[in-house]
Amino acid sequence: MSFMPAGIEIWGYSADVLYAKDVHITLDLEPFAEQLQIKSDVDLASVPKLRFTDDRIWHLVRLLAEVIEDPDPSVQLYGDSLITAIASRLISRASKSSKSSAGFAGLSSMQLKDAMSFLDSQMPNRVELATLAGLAGLSSSHYCRAFKASTGLAPYQWQLHARIERAKCMMLETNRSLDEIAQATGFADTVHFGRTFRKLTQASPGAWRLDRLS
């Protein structure tokens, strides 16, 4: 990996390369440092770093690249979480970035209630992590850890589970088709809905519905 400060000229040359795959991420570090409430590393922001390795950043970047074109609404929160984690890893001091979230204080009951109400009211639309964090008056990185400490799930996971729970209610309380339910709960199509439903419930939507209504 390489880190290049803004405005620096970049060029490269590779002989006999038949295939290359690159991921480019552009970050404005100062707003991220303020948002994350951590002190920026001046050297990192002003000096290029060429061909360095960081397994954690590489793993996060790969996860982000895999979902960048996913139309699922929950991916917004997931992608925001990944970008926040990448920025935090880049600009935080080693001592801070190595801290564990074990024992981290969760959201207050009011903050958690506001989060649930907001996510429910916006379903199935995309919700940005910064929007949720703003409701609680917290930084994005702080909010992610606090939300997970309170619920056991990351915000995007909670939203995905909530969409599946709403789909279950619709399957039991209405005669709407699976295609209509998939669309109403923000899934790209019935196949996407079925794959996610099976992953979380160990059953297909049709089988689950038939079993509950029989």
Image (tube, helix red, strand yellow):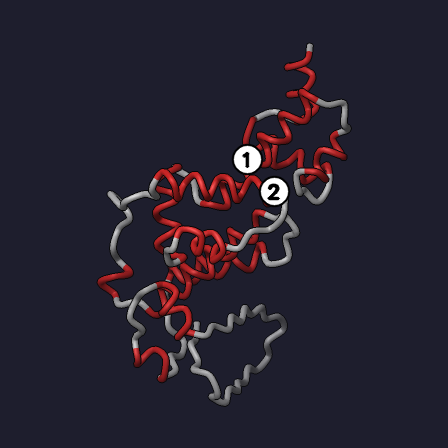
**Label 2 close to label 1 by CB (< 8 Å):** yes
Pick the quarter of the image with the C terminus: top right
Q: Which residue corresponds to the image point at 64% horizontal and 36% vertical from the top-left?
A: 195
How far from the left and from the top, in percent, is residue 136?
40, 51
Q: Which residue corresponds to the image point at 36% horizontal and 38% vertical from the top-left?
A: 109
- Of callouts 2 and 1, which one flags the residue occurring earlier in the amino acid sequence? 2
In this view, the residue in front, 145 or 174, is 174
Q: CA distance from mark 2 to mark 1?
A: 9 Å
Q: Which residue corresponds to the image point at 50% horizontal and 46% vertical from the top-left?
A: 156
How far from the left and from the top, in percent, is residue 172?
67, 20
**Numbered tag placed on residue 123 in the rendering:** 2
Q: Which residue corresponds to the image point at 53% horizontal and 71% vertical from the top-left?
A: 24
Residue 84 figure quarter: bottom left
Pick the quarter of the image with the N terminus: bottom left
Kind of residue sitting beneath label 1: Ala
In this view, the residue in front, 17 or 191, is 191
Above or below, comparing residue 72 to residue 117 in the picture? below
Label 1 secondary element: helix
Mark 1 lies on residue: 162
Residue at the left extreme of this rendering: 95
Instruction: Using a 10 Å C-alpha cutoff, classify the residue at mark 2 as few (fewer than 14 neighbours), some (14 to 19) or many (20 or more).
Output: some
Kind of residue sitting beneath label 2: Met
Q: Is residue 177 left or right of residue 193?
A: right
Residue 55 figure quarter: bottom left
**Numbered tag placed on residue 150 in the rendering:** none
Q: Nearer the viewer, mark 2 or mark 1?
A: 2
Residue at the bottom extreme of this rendering: 9
